[in-house]
Amino acid sequence: MAQASLAVDGISKAFGETRAVRGLSLDAAPGEVIGLLGPNGAGKTTAIRILTTIYAPDSGSFAVDGIPYTRPSAIRQRIGVLPESAGYPLHQSGEEFVQYFARLFGQSRKSARETAKTLLAEVGLAERAASPISMYSRGMRQRLGVARALVNRPRVLFLDEPTLGLDPAGQRQILALISEAATERGATVILSTHFLDEVEEVCSRVIILNRGEVIAEGPVADIKRRAAPRTARVRVPEENHESALSALKRAPGVGDAQAVNGGRGLISATLDGSDTNAPIRALLEAGIPILFFELEGGKLSDAFLALTGEAGA
């Protein structure tokens, strides 16, 4: 088995009487994108600050690329970070900014120039490389931040709310960069975000924190199945609409059934168990023809709210 690029074993952190992170554990493989989710104050940012060696854990341990947390300087050589509130020297150009960090990681002037040129092209800033950062939009600055985080070819890339405040086009660009970092560079990506549709798009699995504790962990599809109800949409002949509604509402394994948008013939049935054939069986037993049947998976947002109880997160 390949060595985990990030191995976390029961890390905890408290500030006074407040337990910010409690017993967080995870193993992350190269090329994996993991969503770190939770309502405000759940411990996401604290967890990232521990794993990026800003904070030391009170207990537990972690390793990056096999390097233990007791060697923070070595870990920093192998990680890339885009914090939620990244600052930029507005007087510098984008290429000067990236070159500066490349030099900090020990690259020669020539190598730093080549690195900056390559990365700025990858994030779509080649034509604005010589422009001062003060002239960059928020989306451009976020892409510049991703370029900076990739300077040292990190084994693990930590991104804290990378699309916050961006328009849809800017969000798409950042998500594409996240996918490329994982698939083309082989980096493990830890993505902390409130935008759950982004998580469904780019993450292979998620960890959900609440009040510092892990309350759910696993592949996105599993989390959705565990906590969010699945829905079946079925169409029957209009003359069978009422009898179909009655049959579905009585059927074992069907929690509820309602007409869709008040229409006749199209019905939405919520499943309260794992038997996805329950609506079909109920209608066939009632002698009702089925014109159309489709299963809709639960949404990650529904699962998130069910697990955390945070309607506003």
Image: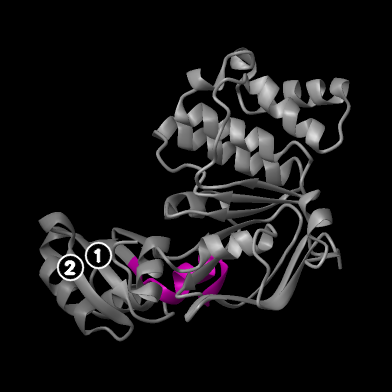
In-image side of 92 versus 196 (left or right): right
| Mark 1 closeness class: few <14, some 14–19, many ≥20 residues within 10 Å | many
Secondary structure beneath dot 1 equals strand
Q: Residue 103 — which label?
A: none
| Residue 145 visible to the viewer | yes
Q: Residue at x 33, y 66 (%)?
A: 232
Above/below status of 188 relative to 301: above
Task: Say which residue appears at 14% left-offset and 74% top-offset.
Answer: 243
Q: Residue at x 15, y 55 (%)?
A: 261
Locate the C terminus and report the quarter of the image it occupies.
bottom left
Whether residue 263 appears in this view of the structure is no
Q: Amino acid at mark 1?
A: Ser
Residue 227 forms part of the magenta stretch: yes
In magenta, the rendered stretch is 213-231
Determine crowd level at label 2: few under 14, some 14-19, many 20+ residues with C-alpha closer than 10 A. Answer: some
Residue designated by label 2: 258
Per the image, is 252 magenta? no
In the displayed structure, 128 sits above or below 215; it is above
Q: Position of residue 4 (x, y in %)?
A: 79, 64
Q: Which residue is mark 1?
A: 268
Query: What colour scheme does the image use?
Result: one colour
- Name the foreground residue: 270 vs 213: 213
Q: Secondary structure at mark 2?
A: strand
User: Picture coordinates of residue 110 (x, y %)?
Assistant: 87, 20
Foreground residue, 190 or 141? Answer: 141
